Amino acid sequence: MTGALGRHQGMVRTIEELEKRLYQLVINRLNGDGIHDASYRKALFNLVKKGLGGFIIFGGAKGEIKDFILELQSLAEIPLFIASDIERGVGQQIKGANSVPCPMAMAAALDRGSPEDALLLENVLKGVADEAIDNGINLPLIPVMDVNQEPDNPIICTRAFSDDPETVSWFGSEYIRTLEHTGLISCAKHFPGHGDTAVDSHIALPVIKKSREDLNGLDLIPFIKAIKTGVSSIMVGHLAVPSLDDVPASLSKKIMYGLLREELGFKGLILTDALDMHALNNRGNLPVKCINAGADMLLHPTDADAAVAGLLSAVVSGEIEDRTVNNAVCRIVRAKERLGRIVPRGADYGASRGLSSLIAEKSITLVKHGPGLLPLTETKDVRLIIAGDIALPSSSPLKHYLPLSFALDDIAAAADETVIFALFASVAAWKGSSGLAGEDKEKIAGLIKQARKAIVISFGSPYVLRYFGEADILIAAFEPTDQAQEAVTRCLKGEMDFMGRLPVKLDQG
C-alpha cells in the first residue's frame, strides 16, 4: 500500500497517469441495495480500476455491504474512502445496523456539564465508530456543525445539535475526538454554516444574508472549534453568502482557500457537498470550478467519468494548474495513509442498542406542563390523533398504548375529550419542509380548543410546538423512532420522568 500511495505523490508522466490521479478526486455514489445486479457491480469495479477516490454509501444490508466493500478495496491500488451520512448511526443507511438519536436529541438528553453524560456520549460514539468500521465505512460524514437558527429550516433542523454555537461546538468536538481516535476520518459540515436558511440546498440555492461579523460570532464558531479539535475533513455547503463572496461557497476560492485554508488554518481535506443537488444548477462545469476554487474531492457527481473527463480537459488546456491537482492528491494520500491505523475491534450491536435507548429516554422534553393531567392512568377514553408526513404502522408503540387512533383528516371534532396529537414532521433531503402544512396547523389548533385536555407531542422538529401554545402539555421527542415512541409512552404513564432539556428556543408562531 505504501508504494502505491507514494507513487501518487510523484511526477505525472502520461495522460493515463494524470487521469488516474484525477479519479482520486471523486467520491461516487454506491447504492447498497443494487449490489446484487451484475452490471451495476461491474460498473463500480471499473471505476475502482480507473483509480476512483471512494464511494458514498446509501442503503444495503449489514454483512452484504461489508463483503462488497472488502471486494472493492481488494481491487483498489490506493485504499478507497468509504463515506456515509450516518448522523443517526450506521443504521441510518445500512439495514441491520443500529440507529442512534439525532443530534438535537443528543443535545436534549445529555448535560455537557455532567461527567456521567459525557462518558455516555463517548460510549455511544465508540459504538457508532465500531459499527462503521465493521461495515467498511472509514469516512463518516459527521458531525453536523451547523447552528440551527431558522425554525423553518427544511434540511438541518434536528440534524443540528442546537441553536447555540457553544453547544454545537462541544457536541461536535466530542464526535470528532472519538471518531478520530479510532482512526476514522471525521467530517464537519456544512461550512460556512447551513443553519440560518429556510431553503433546502438539494432543491435551490440558499442565501445566508449575514454580515461577516455575524458569521464570526455564530456560524463559524463550531468550525473553528472543529479545526482546533483535529477534524480531518470539512464539507463545504452549496450556500450563497454574499458577505463572503458573490459566488456559492462550494465554488468560491475566497471561502475555501482564503477563509478556510489561509485565515482559519485548515490543512485537511475539503469536500464539496453532493454535486447532484440542485443548488448549483446552471452553474456550468461544476467539477472544474470546485477544484479550482479549492476543493480536494468532489462528492457524488452525477457521472464520475464525465467529471473526470472535464477535469482532464481543463488540466490539459491549462484551466486547472498541475499544482492544484498535485496538492489535492497529496492531501488525499496523506489522509488515506491514516486508514491503515484503523483496528477493527468488532461491534457490540446489542450494547450499542441499549445505550441508544437510554439516550432516547433521556431526550424526551416536557416543554409545557399543565398540572393534573399526567400521568395518564386511564387511556380508554383518550383519543390519539396522528398528523404529519409519516404513516405509523399498527405495530408502533404509540398505537399499541393508545389504540383509539385517528388520522387528522378523519376527525371533525374533539368532542370534549382528552386528545393526544402526535405530530410527525421529518427532516429529509428534497422534501422542502420540516414542519406541518398550514391547513394542518389550523385544524389542530381548532381541535385543541374543542378538547377537554390536549397534549401535543412532536416526533420530529420541536419548532412545530410553537404553534400550539393553547395545549395543556407540549412534549418534544425529536424523532419518530420506536425508541422515542416507547420513551414518550413511559413518560405519559408516569413510569419515567421527563429528563430532556430543550436545545433550541421556541418563539410563539
Image (cartoon, grey):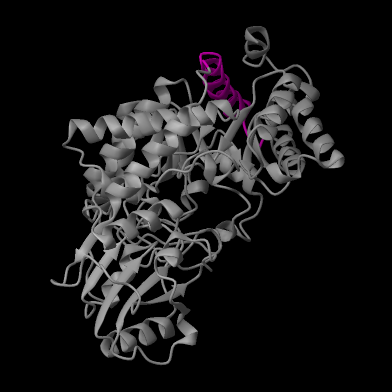
Residue 145, position in %: x, y? 36, 44
Q: Is residue 11 magenta?
A: no
Quadrant where the image shows the N terminus: top right
Residue 293, position in %: x, y? 52, 41
Magenta segment range? 318-343
Q: Residue at x 33, y 30 (%)?
A: 122
Q: Residue at x 65, y 31 (%)?
A: 54
Residue 17: which quarter of the image? Answer: top right
Which residue is nearer to you in this view: 436 or 194? 436
Residue 222, position in %: x, y? 30, 41
Q: Is residue 112 left or right of residue 287?
A: left
Which residue is nearer to you in this view: 291 or 392? 392
Q: Is residue 450 left or right of residue 344?
A: left
Q: Residue at x 46, y 62 (%)?
A: 426
Q: Residue at x 61, y 57 (%)?
A: 283
**Would you say the magenta stretch is mainly helix, strand or loop?**
helix
Tell me if I can see residue 484 in this picture. Answer: yes
Which residue is nearer to you in this view: 125 or 165? 125
Residue 69, position in %: x, y? 68, 29
